[in-house]
Image (cartoon, helix red, strand yellow):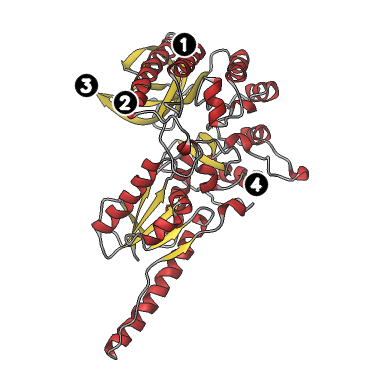
Amino acid sequence: MKSVALHNLGCKVNSYEIEVMQQMLQEKGYTIVPFDEIADIYIVNTCTVTNIADRKSRQMLHRAKQKNPAALVVAVGCYVQTGREDVEQDPCIDLAIGNNRKKDLASILEEYLRDLEQEDAVAENAENAGHGVDKTLHDTTVIDINHTAEYEEMTLKQTAEHTRAYIKIQDGCNQFCTYCIIPYARGRVRSRNIESVLKEVRALAEKGYKEVVLTGIHLSSYGVDFPEEKKETLLSLIRAVHEIEGIRRIRLGSLEPGIVTREFAEGIAALPKVCPHFHLSLQSGCDETLERMNRRYRSGEYRERCELLREVYGNPALTTDVIVGFPQESEEEFRKSYDFVDSIRFYETHIFKYSRRQGTKAAAMDGQLTEAEKSFRSEKMIELHHRHAGDYEKSMLGKNLEVLIEEEYTKDGRTWYLGHSREYIKTAVPKSEAYGVNDIVIVKAEGFLEEHIMTGEAVE
């Protein structure tokens, strides 16, 4: 059977999908090999969130063809969806599969290989007869993603992570932020049937997974596309997952601040398995910038949602994303954003320098900033992030942290177990025969093994 090498670019949804694709290929008898080895087939699950992501997708596809010119190179996913013309003209790409067809990867691949064998046979006969036959290697399997209401059903039976499983529950986005191409790559909101989600979570729980992370392209929109008679919400799904035996922790992917109503906050706070770790997408703390971004909230509303989570949880870990250097962002606007981030005191702030993405409204805006200006602002925000992260971690000293052990970690000749607390604080505990990987232990936080890695002794 042929060997296959897979490579993933992009988000947690992409990571989930490539694991399912690998699983499907293994079930068909393909041999999976590392991407840097010689393989018969190379599959790249592409990303298109920025122009840089497009370039990385092309680079990985070209690297595969250079590794083995005789190999079949397959481009899958978001770059295929938005850059179809470029994909079709790229001689390094033999087969292209768009979003909502990933579930059919194995059958598409087998059909393509069958057709190729037939073409080879025809070409050989024609050459023997003294005639040349033109062989076309390009084939494109891409639907119109903007006009489908079908959720692409994929089920993960096992994940590369041994302790934490990411569960895709939703696809698509209806927001159309001016900097973002994803609605065009992923289409409109499509939610996964709740029974399908629960079936997958139960199966993973039976295999010993103790933590699940609910994720999607726009997680907060889960259920908005369901008909009234089948109406579900993210809260109702979380409640259903909470009932599954064996699952000890539920973590949520990125949320929009608008979903954090009092009903939602108090609803999840009543569920002990839900981790007090919430990633609320911000992008800017300046209202004028938020307006140009076409974000659906303003800084005052965002602050209220953070305060509500702190009211019901006490001291949850709040994390966020911030874009610096958005078109027309003045010094004053950046200062407003910086001061707002400073005032919220996030545990983690993921900083992104604005990247001009062809095909978006923001790319055509006047007032594009220089790379030097964006870099300076990014550095200022990163300094703020480290200060706040350190402050939050120090607030945990002397407290008991519930840590899910994920791996061994060696430092200065000593072996530790390393995992994450419910707040997603990386925590190390001395290796012991009393516990191991995939165990949950209570650790009294006493200090730091290194920056942003807390440590302490296990509490009996």
* Residue at x-position 62% and y-position 13%: 311
Q: Quadrant of the N terminus?
A: bottom left
* Residue at x-position 63% and y-position 39%: 222
- Residues at discs 3 and 2 in contact (Cβ within 8 Å): no
- Rate crowding at label 3 as few (under 14), some (14 to 19) or many (20 or more) other CA atoms within 10 Å: few
Q: Nearer the viewer, mark 3 or mark 2?
A: 2
- Rate crowding at label 1 as few (under 14), some (14 to 19) or many (20 or more) other CA atoms within 10 Å: few
Residue 193 - label: 4
Instruction: Tell me the CA gap for discs 3 and 1.
Output: 26 Å
- Residue 206 showing in the rendered view: no
Instruction: Tell me the CA gap for discs 4 and 2.
Output: 47 Å
Q: Is tag 4's residue or tag 3's residue first in the polypeptide sequence?
A: 4
Q: Nearer the viewer, mark 1 or mark 4?
A: 4
Q: In the rendering, at what x and y percent does residue 325 appear? A: 42, 26
Q: Amino acid at mark 1?
A: Lys
Indicate the secondary structure of the residue bearing disc 3: loop
Residue at far left of view: 413
Q: In the rendering, at what x and y percent does residue 197 appear? A: 60, 44
Find disc 2 in the rendering and name its residue: 372
Q: Amino acid at mark 2?
A: Ala
Indicate the secondary structure of the residue bearing disc 4: loop
Find disc 1 in the rendering and name its residue: 399
Instruction: Tell me the CA gap for discs 1 and 4.
Output: 40 Å
Instruction: Tell me the CA gap for discs 1 and 2.
Output: 42 Å
